[in-house]
Amino acid sequence: MDFTLILFIVLAAVAVLTAIGMLVSRNAVYAALFLVLNFATVAIFYLMLGAPFIAMAQVTVYAGAIMVLFLFVIMLLGAEKLPKGGVLPWQRPLAIGLAAVLLAEAGYLLFQRIQMTTELAGPGLEVNSVEAVRTLGLALFNQYLLPFEVTSVLLLVAMIGAIVLTKKEKGEA
Amino acid sequence: MLPLTYYLVISAILFVLGALGVLIRRNPLIIFMSVELMLNAANLAFVAFARSFDVLTGQIFVFFVIAVAAAEVAVGLALIVVIFRTKHSIDVDLMSSLKG
């Protein structure tokens, strides 16, 4: 077993266990912290796949900004724990059954269509260089310039929307 | 390097766990986190395919997905804050009427 495979198996185990931990933890703060760890392992997957820019964006935007926003709202609302209420009794078994069906479908498609043995080309040495980020930036600012600018408008609209939604109306205060 | 299938399998597992979280949890914050988990699984598949076919487009699409996810989280969390302010709870079972 070479080093890459061992690294992959360890990271995959961490990713799956943290995702399960997020699902079962009663406390929303723990769930958020599990998800941060999950995002970090996915960022290392990106590095293994030769996508250093995406890995760094994952760490700063997802594990950094988005999860901090989540933790901020959880603590602002004091909504770490929900009181145990009357849950639909058949909901959980049905959901787990449907998830198993989804996983079976995905696995069937994967193993039917793709050969297990085709390895990805080359080690990620030269792809994890400054040159890779340079190429990505050139593509982003030449071929994909319009979508990039539209993204900035989208972020502006989301920011204004969030402010308008949470603003107290006059006389309501 | 590892076969493409390994990355697709871990992506599929993470996506299914995210979908399961949306179905079984009643805390909208955790449902939201599960949606983020599903987006991440899709991103992982994108990057794996981009590496496999040796094109950059997959990585650029992931960049846009990350930007859209950031916008979505900002608006979604604002909605949750407003719902908490009117109903004093964020249990999804209580969100059964459109009137505020």
Image (cartoon, coloured by chain):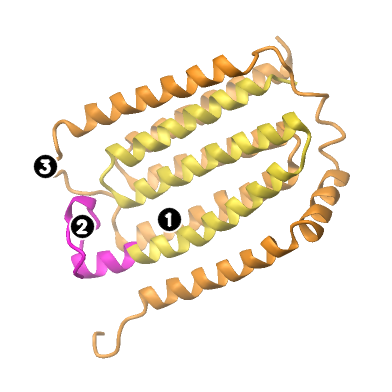
Chain colours: A orange, B yellow
Q: Residue A113 at what x, y percent from top left?
A: 59, 18
Figure check: B70 above or below B4: below
- The local secondary structure at tag 2 comes to loop
Q: Residue at 78% x, 34% y: name it.
A: B54
Task: Name the residue beneath numbered marker 1.
Answer: A71
Q: Which of marks 3 and 1 is in front?
A: 3
Vertical arrangement, residue A32 with respect to residue B52, above or below: below
Do dots 3 and 1 share one subunit?
yes
Picture quarter with the N terminus of chain A: top right
Q: Which disc number belongs to residue B95?
A: 2
Task: Please state the extent of the stretch shown in magenta in the rendering.
Answer: B80-100
In the rendered view, does B46 fall on the left or right side of B17? Answer: right
Separation of residues labelled 3 and 1 (CA atoms)? 27 Å
Q: In the current view of this chain or complex, which residue is farthest to the front?
A: A113
Left or right: residue A31 compared with residue B53: left
The residue shown at (31%, 62%) is A77
Callout 1 amino acid: Leu
Check if mark 1 and mark 2 are on a common chain. no
For the residue labelled by badge 1, is the local secondary structure a helix, a strand or a loop?
helix
Question: Which numbered tag is attached to residue A86?
Answer: 3
Q: From the viewer's perspective, is the residue at label 2 or at label 3 nearer?
A: 2
As for residue B85 lying within the magenta part, the answer is: yes
Dot 2 amino acid type: Met
